[in-house]
Amino acid sequence: MEERKTVQFKKEEYAMKKCIKELLGKGRVSKVIIEYTPIGEKVIISSHKPGLIIGRKGARIEELTTLLKSKFKLENPHIELDEVTEPNFDAQIMADEIALALEKLGPVKFKVIAYKALQNIIKAGALGVEIRLNGKLPGARAKSWRFAHGYLKKTGDSAKVVDRAQSRAETKPGTVGVKVSILSPYALLTDKITLNEKVIEKLKKNSESIKEKESKKLAK
């Protein structure tokens, strides 16, 4: 019984997040986090365009609050905005921007759109990026295209810090799936090794000691 309630609760939460993103528009929202407190529900919206989320004189916020109360029966929803200062490192924002560009320019220019996004992310300082497009690009048959650059781990602890997201572009030939993976320069990599002067000196000493031991063995 408890499992059913948990599943239903998660489904309602997912529907709520999806509804918020659809209302505010594609490309404006990165993440939606819902926290439950004794005084009400806190809805945290991450966006790199907070002005568009707020609207003129807070009209969008009021509209969103009314929707949450009427459709999802929230008693006292409190909406907070979390500004994304570096959108080039946010996988969801970049995936939505690629999807919007495909809808605007068409799937024929998918390579230009993908390479431009890739270049912007790398120029911003990302350690690695991967863009995957799946759909009718540009032929009649669906095909998968991959655009990648830099360091991007797929397994292990380092893979957990990779920001991943997906979006959809509704083009005339059909739906195009967009997947973006970004490794931010601020990500903590457990397997990263920094070679400074102390480390290099230590390696030299170890190498010299090994050579001395080998020469002594040969002398015997």
Image (cartoon, rainbow, N blue to C red):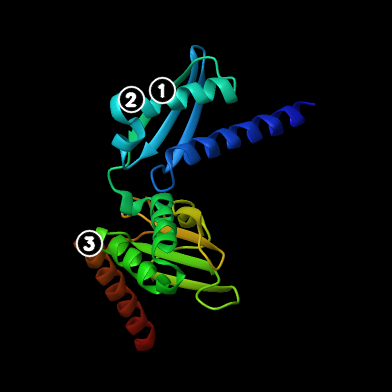
The residue depicted at 47 percent of the width and 72 percent of the height is 146
The residue depicted at 39 percent of the width and 68 percent of the height is 114
Q: Quadrant of the N terminus?
A: top right
Upstream in sequence: badge 2 or badge 3:
2
In the image, is residue 65 above or below residue 13?
Answer: above
Q: Position of residue 130 (x, y in %)?
A: 43, 65
Q: Which residue is mark 1?
A: 62
Question: Along the line of sight, which residue is nearer the eye, 11 or 202?
Answer: 11
Give the residue furthest to the front: 172
The answer to whether the residue labelled 2 contacts the one labelled 1, judged by CB atoms less than 8 Å apart, is: yes
SS at mark 1? helix
Q: Position of residue 212 (x, y in %)?
A: 30, 78
Q: Which residue is mark 2?
A: 58
Q: Quadrant of the C terminus?
A: bottom left
- Asked which quadrant contains residue 119, the reply is bottom left
Q: Is residue 96 left or right of residue 118?
A: right
User: Label 2, label 3: how many angstroms apart (C-alpha)?
Assistant: 51 Å
Q: Is residue 52 left or right of residue 131?
A: left
Upstream in sequence: badge 3 or badge 1:
1
- Asked which quadrant contains residue 75, the reply is top right
Question: Along the line of sight, which residue is nearer the eye, 133 or 207?
Answer: 133
In the image, is residue 137 above or below residue 63?
Answer: below
Q: Is residue 57 left or right of residue 33?
A: left
User: Label 2, label 1: how many angstroms apart (C-alpha)?
Assistant: 6 Å
- The answer, for residue 119, to whether it is visible in the render is yes
Label at residue 196: 3
Q: Report the amino acid beneath label 3.
A: Asn
Question: Along the line of sight, which residue is nearer the eye, 175 or 78?
Answer: 175
SS at mark 2? helix
